[in-house]
Image (cartoon, grey):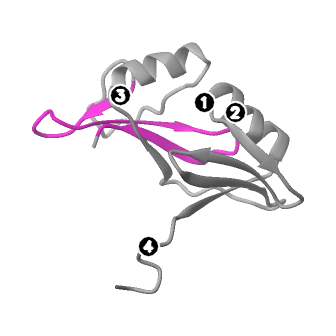
Amino acid sequence: MGILASAKPAIIICTRDRARAVAFYRDTLGLQLAHEDGLASVFNIGGVTLRVSAVADFTPHEHTILGFNVPDVEATVKALRRSGVIFNIYPHLPQNEFGILTLPGGAMHVAWMQDPDGNVLSVTDA
C-alpha cells in the first residue's frame, strides 16, 4: 500500500475574496460551513474537507477544479439555476438548454458552472 493510499483528501480552492466565496459555497451551493480560521473557510462535503483560501493575486484555471457527483444532474442543475447559478455553455459541445452534456452512450451527464472567482465546477452522474 502506498504512503498516502488511505489518507482522506482535502480540496483547496483559491479565491481573491473569501467572504464572497463563502457566501457562494454556503448560500448558493448549500454547503455547510464547518469552521473558519486565519487561513481558510472550511466546508465538509461527503466526508472530504474543502478549504477556501484567499490568495490576492489568484488567477483561475480554465478547466474543472472540483466536481460534484450527484444522482440526478438535471434536477441538480435546475435547483442550482433557481439559486442563481449560471451554467457554462461551450460552443464546441452538444449541451442541452440547461447546459448539460450527455456523453456518448447516454448514461453519463455533466454540466459546468463557475464560482465568483471563475473557478470551474461541475455536476455529474459519472
Report how far apart the C-alphas of labels 4 and 2 lie in the structure. 28 Å
- In the displayed structure, would residue 86 be above or below residue 53? above
- Mark identifier at residue 6: 4
Q: Residues within 10 Å of mark 3 (few under 14, many from 20)?
A: many
In percent of width and height, residue 118 lies at 63, 45
Q: Image point 89% across, 59% down: which residue?
A: 38
35 relative to 116 in the view: left or right: right
Sequence-first disc among 4 and 2: 4
Name the image quarter holding the N terminus.
bottom left
Quarter of image, res 101? top left
- Mark identifier at residue 26: 2
Name the residue at the left extreme.
105
Q: Residues within 10 Å of mark 1 (few under 14, many from 20)?
A: some
Residue segment shown in magenta? 99-125
User: Dot 2 lies on which element?
Assistant: helix
- Mark identifier at residue 55: none
User: Dot 3 lies on which element?
Assistant: helix
Callout 1 amino acid = Leu
Q: Is residue 60 magenta?
A: no
* Image marks 3 and 4: residues in contact by CB distance under 8 Å: no
**Where does label 3 land, which residue?**
73
Q: Nearer the viewer, residue 108 or 51?
A: 51
Report how far apart the C-alphas of labels 4 and 1 lie in the structure. 28 Å
Report how far apart the C-alphas of labels 2 and 1 lie in the structure. 6 Å
* Image marks 2 and 1: residues in contact by CB distance under 8 Å: yes
* Image marks 4 and 1: residues in contact by CB distance under 8 Å: no
Q: Image point 39% across, 27% down: which residue?
A: 99
Q: Is residue 118 magenta?
A: yes
- Mark identifier at residue 29: 1
Name the residue at the top extreme.
82
